[in-house]
Image (tube, helix red, strand yellow):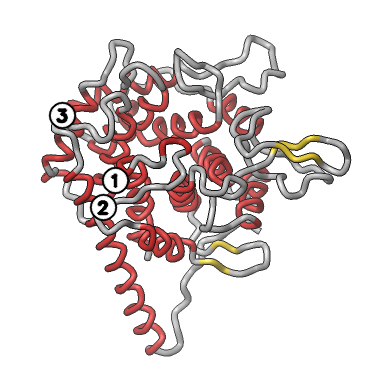
Amino acid sequence: MVATVVAEAAPAVVPPVLIAARTNISERNEVRLAIDKGLAWLQQNQHTNGYWSTPDQPAITSLALEAFELSPGHDPKAEPPAVLNGYRYVVGCVQPDGGIYRKELQSYNTSLSLVALALGNRPEYRPLIINARHFLINLQNLPESGDTNDNSAGGIGYGNSDKQPDLSNTAVVLEALRMSQSFETDKGLASRDLNWPAAVRFIQACQNPPAADDKPDQGGFIYAPGDSNAGETNLPSGRVALRSYGSMSYAGLLSYIYADLKPDDSRVIAVMDWLKANYTLDENPAMGSQGLFYYYHTMAKALTVYGANILYTKDGQGVNWREQLAFKLINLQKADGSWSNDNGRWFEKDPSLVTSYSLIALDLIYPKL
């Protein structure tokens, strides 16, 4: 059963409604306070040149800008100086090829910068957005004519310096292209688009298929065809299976949605079944504390875009994932307003990165509480 949007029926009596409303207001106030504290920390810890954390990775600054842009009460006509300075830095990272990066991780940096610029939505960003879209589209690894056996075809890697496709980079590229697509079409400037059918084939190649001898992993996602950061499992049949894990499974769900697959598509149902069976906020499933805040961030994005209000777990229990994730993040927030992970895998000891991840998740949760 796919997680569904639960319609709220009109209650028969008034008091429960009042109780629910009071609880909801209290939760929203707590989340809003956590967001405000996190944004204040970001403002206080921005470099004078406009970037957060490092000048070499505009992606981190772009995540911080996304956190500001999505925050409740944000007024795009009255951007705080931190946001304006952040955008100046990101614009300064634009390269002649249209990418937005310094040296490495070209697609990752360009994708997150493109999302930030699209959210900033200023007329002067428009040509930069269009050029960045074209840069990303040109990074797609397309199959040779007639070659249907290349599992890497359709995906995107880190960029010109590392073209080997993976689901993590492919997911952020798809998000950037979807969030910026109106800038191509609103004035008739549409050009060559991504090969979306090829992208779907690549996403599917990263999904563990149904297998009678590997029920724990079927439907979930791995990092790339033939490669899982969660390692391998030796099955009783003698077959070696690649383990599905939480953050990539949410990235896979998000990618399917951006590729316009519907909730009743068997591939979407399969990953939702895996996510329901492995729902937890105590760890990144199969990865422990590694990439934990990326997991929270991607969970919030995927379930928000999917439209799940209540997530039904494998035992049939209805989970208010927004409420649970909000309080988990509030409890993990440090006294100074920041977040960080004790596990440094994928740079998650960096408070600028992890604070941005956490704020984006809370920004998405807040309106629906």
Nearer-N-terminus badge (1/3): 3
Which residue is painted at 20% across and 34% down in the image? 86
What amino acid type should be assigned to the residue bearing mark 1? Ala
The image quadrant where one finds the N terminus is bottom right
Which residue is painted at 66% across and 23% down in the image? 151
Separation (CA) of disc 1 from disc 3: 19 Å
Nearer-N-terminus badge (1/2): 2
How crowded pointer 1 is (Cα within 10 Å; few <14, some 14-19, many 20+) is rated as: many
The x, y position of residue 341, in whole percent, is 41, 47
- Name the element at disc 3: loop
Q: Which residue is mark 2?
A: 38
How crowded pointer 2 is (Cα within 10 Å; few <14, some 14-19, many 20+) is rated as: many
- Contact between marks 1 and 3 (CB within 8 A): the answer is no
Q: Is 159 placed above or below 235 here?
A: above
Q: Which residue is mark 3?
A: 49
Residue nearest the viewer, comparing 126 with 288: 288
Which residue is painted at 53% across and 58% down in the image? 282
Separation (CA) of disc 2 from disc 3: 20 Å
- Contact between marks 1 and 2 (CB within 8 A): the answer is yes
The single residue placed furthest to the front in the displayed view is 342
The x, y position of residue 12, in whole percent, is 45, 88
Residue nearest the viewer, comparing 334 with 68: 334
Give the mark toward the camera: 1 or 3. Answer: 3
Q: Which residue is mark 1?
A: 67
Q: Quadrant of residue 128?
A: top left
- Name the element at disc 2: helix
The x, y position of residue 358, in whole percent, is 36, 50
The single residue placed furthest to the right in the displayed view is 237
